Amino acid sequence: MQSEYQHLIDLNDYPVSWWQKVVELGEQIKNDPAAYAHKCDGKVMATLFYEPSTRTQMSFQTAMIRLGGQIIGFDNPANSSVSKGETIKDTTKIVSNYADILVIRHPIAGAAKAASLTADCSVINAGDGGHLHPTQTLTDLLTLKIEKKSLSGLTVGMCGDLINGRTVHSLCKALSMFENNHFIFISTPELRMPAYIKDIIKANGSSFEEADTIEEVIGKLDVLYMTRIQQERFASTEDYLAQKNTYVLDKRKMSMARKDMIVMHPLPRVDEITVDVDDDPRAMYFTQAKYGVFARMALIMTMLSEKKSFETLKGKVYPNVKCDNPKCITNHEAYLPKSFRFSRDETLLECEFCDERKLI
């Protein structure tokens, strides 16, 4: 299925050279933001945020304002026609008549791809459930480019809720495309990185290992990427409380790390990084959030300046096949095509909206 508009649903829809172009533009904007103050004069961006957000929503809004554009949208679906039962298709079809670019965050995996099928403007995925978060990944790549001077040859520790962590899913997929990167996944057995992410890492020629504690691996790391245990992704409060406070980064653990290691976090944090770490020069999470504005300014400019068609669905529609993921958008909006692609070894079908696998 083709769209006449360019969309960003998953960074891996684009070649690495495209990511690098956006990251390099973000660095140029950081160094001279005033030079870009009128690049989007007369343009309108719609932000459709179906779940709470501080950094992503505000950084997108700030980015568009600093580029000279205007903003419409909602940050609470209860204040929109969504509360009356309006589908993503109808919401995005209407709002895209008013805007040049649309940014959507949604608690259900695949929602941004669903929006891209019918929107009459470019769509940017600002996070779809526990699935993907490509603009956070661009922020992370820009942070690494500036602070580590390279996107290759890094040992990256990822800690916390790795099964539900859309930020770590997107970052793993991206960094595995660069040479000699090694990942160390620090989590409980219940929160391990999904198998499909591990398969992508291996297929791209990168390597990974798994660990149970921060202490056993922190001395090896160039980057420690902390994530919170996400209460909203758990089926019950009991399940959440069983994992809460498992991983806490504090000054004692930081004393075991290398002098040039940096700590990143997509935020918000709850209690997984103690406040006494904030003053450590290796703590990069607040600076990382600042860089997010420059990354999104670069992305908005790139999306609005490039006019080319986008292949929204590449798989095959199986009308009688149901995705097994209850959190997939295809199980919530019945009009969507049941589109699947074959896994790399062609023994499984992968849902094109949420990447959930099922046996053929």
Image (cartoon, rainbow, N blue to C red):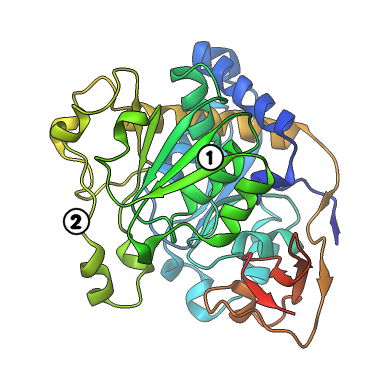
Q: Is residue 10 left or right of residue 184?
A: right
The circle drawn on residue 245 is: 2
The circle drawn on residue 187 is: none
Q: Nearer the viewer, residue 46 or 54?
A: 54
Quadrant assignment, res 75: bottom left
Q: Nearer the viewer, residue 54 or 312?
A: 312
Q: Quadrant of the C terminus?
A: bottom right
Q: Is residue 244 left or right of residue 1?
A: left
Instruction: Identify the residue shown where x is 42% and y is 61%.
Output: 51
Of labels 2 and 1, earlier in sequence is 1
The reply to whether residue 294 is in sight is yes
Quadrant assignment, res 283: top left
Q: Give x and y (percent) for residue 271.
A: 19, 49
Q: Quadrant of the N terminus?
A: bottom right
**Residue named by callout 1:** 137
Dot 1 surroundings within 10 Å: few (below 14), some, or many (20 or more)? many
Q: Secondary structure at mark 2?
A: loop
